[in-house]
Image (spheres, helix red, strand yellow):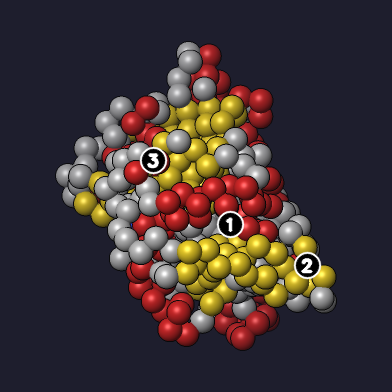
Amino acid sequence: MVKAVVGANWGDEGKGKITDMLSQETDIIVRFQGGANAGHTIVNDYGKFALHTLPSGVFYGHTTSIIGNGVALNIPVLFKEIQDIVDRNVPMPKILVSDRAQMVMPYHILFDAYEEERLAGKSFGSTKSGIAPFYSDKYAKIGFQVNELFEPEKLKEKLLRVIVQKNILLEHLYHKPLLDAEELFQTLMEYRQMIEPYVCDVSAYLYQAIKDGKNILLEGQLGSLKDPDHGIYPMVTSSSTLAAYGAIGAGIPPYEIKQIITVVKAYSSAVGAGAFVSEIFGDEADELRRRGGDGGEYGATTGRPRRMGWFDCVASKYGCRIQGTTDVAFTVLDVLGYLDEIPVCVGYDIDGEVTTDFPTTGKLEKAKPVLKNMPGWKCDIRGIKTYEELPENCRKYIEFIEEQIGFPITMISNGPGRNDIIYR
Ligand code: GDP
């Protein structure tokens, strides 16, 4: 059976924790999109880890961790991540990397930084991991798949060809040092050594695994609103963040995905630029940021302070719908225990008209939040194990949001740990 764990919003919903928790009963965990630009934070018996490329299942001896063809594979980052966890006494995980995954090239990272520099104030707030230049090249058909590392002669020839175009941009647009084909080739040969033990025909492997009745989990990065088609374009990421893309980015039939667990956070946070209707500022935001997540709302990859906001029913309803949600995992609820009243965004006012339908970007930028105050519960709910034991106002908050978004909240996360979960 195949499940997907994905985000409904701007990312950082706590997907890593939910995946880690579900991993106990999972045989195979697959990353199907994105790259090392975002990360998951996971707290378990080995310590606290920030993973960028590895799936969250690497901490279990029984799981196989897969990097699917849809991922932007940064080989040295992956290599270092494996090294880091092994150095901290986690047993060497079983890892497979799709032979069709494409590689983030050193120049993708350079181009990402150069373009942000060129755009200056108008930049997208990229993490400069090379993701946008990587996916541009993939779809321009000048990317490099892992399998190409094993045909060095052809690889060299293609490198020479691709570099011509890159060097024209470097010279005339960015005024930066040019690329050297021989040096790049040597780097790729080092990548080959690093990746060789893990390379696999992943779609064939998963085809067999599905036949054998294995439990497979597709792990998404970021969330619905960062999807290039359905999100807040152009302030989006460069690969699809939707569960549907899991079929493509892993190489399995779409009808095999039976459960779509959409992770929704009890308040909002976002990184990077773009419209964020329920955003809050000043002391109110600082306090939520400081108390948020596990040790504050700061980017797992960049350490950047996240933008903060109240729960957004409009964005979350849409985010859940576009994912094809079967279950909502409602996370980080414990953080809200300090508030007397909890504002929730229940509608968008666009030019005087209130809507609960998430609009396209131009309209979104004009939207003002319509807020409703919910009573707080003013206590710490960590450690509570059953739904009935939650304070009444806390249950009212959950049930109100469930009604607004229109998808069943079947899991409630009330702490960062693996076991801080309440099933409904
Ligand atoms: P992801 O990219 O969606 O996995 O999100 P992050 O890595 O940003 O995770 C959000 C943060 O919240 C991490 O530091 C988690 O350890 C933490 N976290 C996840 N669930 C909960 C929860 O229910 N309560 C609290 N307090 N922290 C949580």
From the image, tell me which residue sits under label 3: 388
Q: Residue 150 at x, y = what percent?
A: 49, 38
Q: In this view, does 395 lie above or below 296?
A: above
Lower position in the chain sequence, tag 2 or tag 3:
2
Evaluate whether residue 127 shows in this view: no
Q: Is residue 369 above or below residue 213?
A: below
Give the residue type at disc 1.
Answer: Asn
Q: Residue 179 at x, y = what percent?
A: 54, 69
Q: Is residue 67 above or below residue 130?
A: above
Q: In this image, 413 relative to 87: left or right? A: right
Query: How far, Cα to Cα, is label 3 from label 1?
Result: 28 Å
Report ligand 1 position as a quadrant. Answer: bottom left
From the image, tell me which residue sits under label 1: 9
Query: How far, Cα to Cα, is label 2 from label 3?
Result: 35 Å
* Of 334 and 78, the residue lying toward us: 334
Question: Can you tell which of label 3 and label 1 is closer to the viewer?
Answer: 3
Q: Is residue 390 above or below residue 226?
A: above
